Image (cartoon, rainbow, N blue to C red):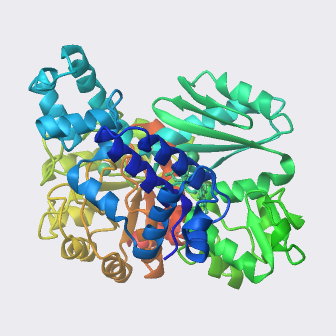
């Protein structure tokens, strides 16, 4: 078992918290200092433990014999007996509870002993019931503070939406564009990989003047709080999102960008490939370490063979640049080595949108306004797909068959009047048996039928979704899982099975680009593409500005290895008509 330094450090911190909660003195501080030094240690502390036992581990700065023995115990047995006992004595969600401002480990200990508080929910309940103010050492004011901080803590425990973080990163890049000390600025981390949710925003700047860059960063108008500002490193919070900046010299920028883009698992593949070639790759560069002996080994030891650009870093390992969206250790390093990386779909390839709404259902704009918005973007076609009535539609939002027939006439009238191709469609609801909420004869009159699940969004949906994609009139399976990020996980289903059925039935699977959905997700798209299914990247726009959300969908499709050929709405009007059987 390989144990990372940060995993060991987290354990030691948990130890410190639990000791502190028991009102133990001095020891918590020793554990915290040890944790910090283990985390920062440049070689594997677990390896030290395995090779040299507790003596070797206690060589790490500020790690005493007792703590070193605990590290060895963990590396050898996978647990630490004393920690298990502490956990049993205090079975609480320590991380969750201490994320509430004003609640530290000591408070957690007291509230558990006095009131049995174990979770954030318990804490909130106790505060609302005014039980906390009765505990000695607490008062009404403290209780009120806890209550108002619980909600905030809950929110900040959630990962941020890509759709909230990306515009922030765009803004800081514009801000840095005017700063002369900044030679290059790139987003790194999960945001550069376009993950649907992100922990924090990582920014990387190339500069010879780190101080000027850090100053410009903390001066950014959107920075609400400066969390820290050091030499070549700083963090701020903006709109509740943490933004981490690192400044590096230009000759190391490519290596740093590669490293901090991650994912960790991708980087491990890359590092292993370097080792096979007698090279070392880290955040400072790629180094030929053939002539470096152990004694003089350090981060920049050896002959630098690459570092200024990412292309150069990958080239040193005989690889083409791997697009960031693919760096999830899902076969991309092997494909790169074999020269079979896909030519990924790009935002510019998109020629139309097949899922959008108007005032006929819950949209904010008329058919004509939505059509004109699409024409202004230079699209060649769009599909007007308002909600049909049926399971999951509440408050009279959905149209019945008569209303849909009436709308069809208006769609045809607008279509006759404009230069872009306007398909007449609908978004029908998939019921629990996989049937649709619109009559077959009407569906047959429509050009492009989107079918989506809007109700009973839990449990296994495989049969239900197969039923929908096999319906002869269905052209697009809309937001297949029905998930809402941070709110509900949506249907489970076997993607391979649904995708194979979709490929056979000539039904496209949607990547819904709305940043609250991003449904299908990248991993599912990869399976779908592999199974030969066609993808549709749609915005589900309720107003023309929402067509801009298409980039989130395209990058999600890229995370699924999709090429333009795989994506229906990059095709020509004629090819799409052919797919729709028109
Ligand atoms: P997030 O922020 O949770 O959405 O995910 P990331 O991927 O942005 O992770 P983050 O912000 O902790 O670090 C950014 C990248 O830096 C990460 O993707 C890989 C790299 N990195 C950070 N720490 C380590 C580490 O201890 N080992 C390795 N191999 N890579 C690391
Ligand atoms: Ca991050
Ligand atoms: Ca980070
Ligand atoms: Zn919709």
Query: Considering the image in quadrants, where does the C terminus appear?
Result: bottom left
Instruction: Name the side, left or right, on which 402 lies relative to 219.
Output: left
User: Where is residue 388 shown, x and y percent of the image?
Assistant: 19, 51
Residue 340 lies, with reference to residue 210, above or below; the image says: below
Q: Position of residue 211 (x, y in %)?
A: 78, 30
Of 119 and 330, nearer the camera is 119
Snapshot quadrant of residue 271:
bottom right
- Asked if residue 98 can be seen in this view, the reply is yes
Can you say whether 63 is above or below 507 in the image? Answer: above
| Residue farthest along the top direction in this orientation | 141
Residue in the foreground of this view, choosing between 217 and 49 = 49
Instruction: Quadrant for residue 313, please give it.
Output: bottom right
Q: Nearer the viewer, residue 43 or 409?
A: 43
Q: How many marks?
A: 0
Q: Position of residue 486 (x, y in %)?
A: 32, 47
In percent of width and height, residue 363 lies at 31, 38
Visible residue check, residue 326:
no
Name the residue: 42% across, 47% down: 515
Out of 525 and 247, give the one closest to the viewer: 247
Would residue 240 appear left or right of 255 to someone viewing this image?
A: left
Q: What residue lies at 49% left-to-right and 68% top-to-bottom?
A: 72
């Amino acid at each position: 078992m390989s144990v990372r330094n940060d995993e060991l450090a987290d354990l030691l911190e948990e130890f410190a918290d639990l000791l502190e909660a028991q009102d133990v003195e001095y020891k918590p501080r020793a554990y915290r200092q040890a944790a910090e030094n283990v985390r920062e240690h440049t070689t594997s502390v677990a390896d030290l433990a395995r090779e040299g036992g507790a003596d070797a581990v206690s060589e790490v700065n500020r790690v005493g014999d007792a703590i070193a023995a605990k590290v060895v115990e963990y590396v050898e047995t996978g647990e630490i007996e004393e920690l298990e006992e502490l956990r049993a004595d205090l079975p609480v969600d320590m991380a969750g509870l201490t994320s509430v401002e004003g609640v530290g480990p000591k408070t957690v200990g007291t509230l558990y002993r006095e009131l049995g508080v174990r979770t954030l929910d318990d804490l909130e309940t106790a505060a609302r019931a005014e039980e906390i103010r009765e505990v000695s050492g607490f008062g009404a004011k403290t209780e009120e503070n806890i209550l108002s901080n619980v909600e905030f803590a809950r929110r900040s425990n959630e990962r941020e939406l890509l759709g909230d973080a990306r515009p922030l990163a765009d803004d800081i890049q514009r801000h840095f564009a005017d700063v002369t000390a900044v030679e290059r600025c790139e987003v790194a981390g999960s945001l550069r990989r376009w993950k649907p949710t992100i922990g924090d925003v990582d920014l990387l700047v190339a500069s010879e003047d780190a101080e000027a860059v850090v100053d410009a960063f903390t001066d950014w108008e959107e920075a609400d709080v400066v969390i820290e500002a050091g030499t070549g490193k700083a963090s701020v919070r903006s709109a509740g999102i943490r933004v981490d900046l690192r400044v590096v010299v230009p000759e190391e920028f490519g290596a740093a960008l590669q490293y901090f883009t991650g994912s960790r698992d991708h980087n491990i593949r890359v590092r292993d490939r370097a080792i096979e070639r007698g090279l070392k790759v880290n955040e400072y560069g790629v180094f030929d370490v053939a002539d470096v002996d152990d004694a003089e080994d350090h981060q920049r030891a050896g002959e630098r063979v690459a570092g200024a650009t990412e292309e150069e870093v990958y080239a040193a390992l005989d690889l083409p640049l791997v697009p960031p969206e693919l760096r999830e250790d899902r076969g991309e390093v092997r494909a790169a080595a074999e020269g079979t990386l896909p030519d990924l779909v790009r935002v510019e390839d998109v020629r139309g949108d097949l899922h959008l709404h108007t005032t006929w259902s819950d949209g904010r704009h008329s058919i004509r306004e939505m059509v004109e918005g699409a024409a202004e973007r230079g699209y060649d076609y769009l599909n007007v797909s308002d909600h049909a009535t049926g399971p999951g539609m509440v408050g009279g939002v959905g149209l019945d068959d008569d209303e849909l027939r009436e709308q069809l006439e208006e769609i045809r009238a607008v279509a006759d009047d404009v230069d872009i191709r306007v398909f007449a469609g609908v978004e029908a609801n998939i019921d629990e048996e996989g049937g649709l909420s619109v009559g077959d004869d009407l569906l047959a009159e429509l050009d492009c039928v989107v079918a989506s699940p809007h109700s009973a969004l839990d449990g296994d949906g495989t049969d239900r979704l197969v039923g929908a994609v096999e319906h002869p009139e269905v052209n697009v399976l809309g937001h297949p899982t029905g998930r809402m990020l941070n709110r509900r996980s949506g249907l489970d289903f076997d993607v391979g099975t649904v995708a194979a059925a979709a490929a056979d039935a000539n039904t496209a699977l949607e990547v819904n680009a709305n940043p609250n959905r991003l449904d299908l997700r990248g991993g599912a798209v990869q399976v779908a593409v592999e199974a030969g299914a066609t993808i549709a990247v749609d915005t589900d726009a309720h107003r023309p500005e929402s067509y801009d959300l298409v980039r989130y969908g395209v990058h999600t499709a890229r995370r699924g290895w999709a090429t333009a050929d795989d994506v229906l709405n990059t095709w020509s009007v004629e090819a799409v008509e052919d797919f729709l059987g028109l």
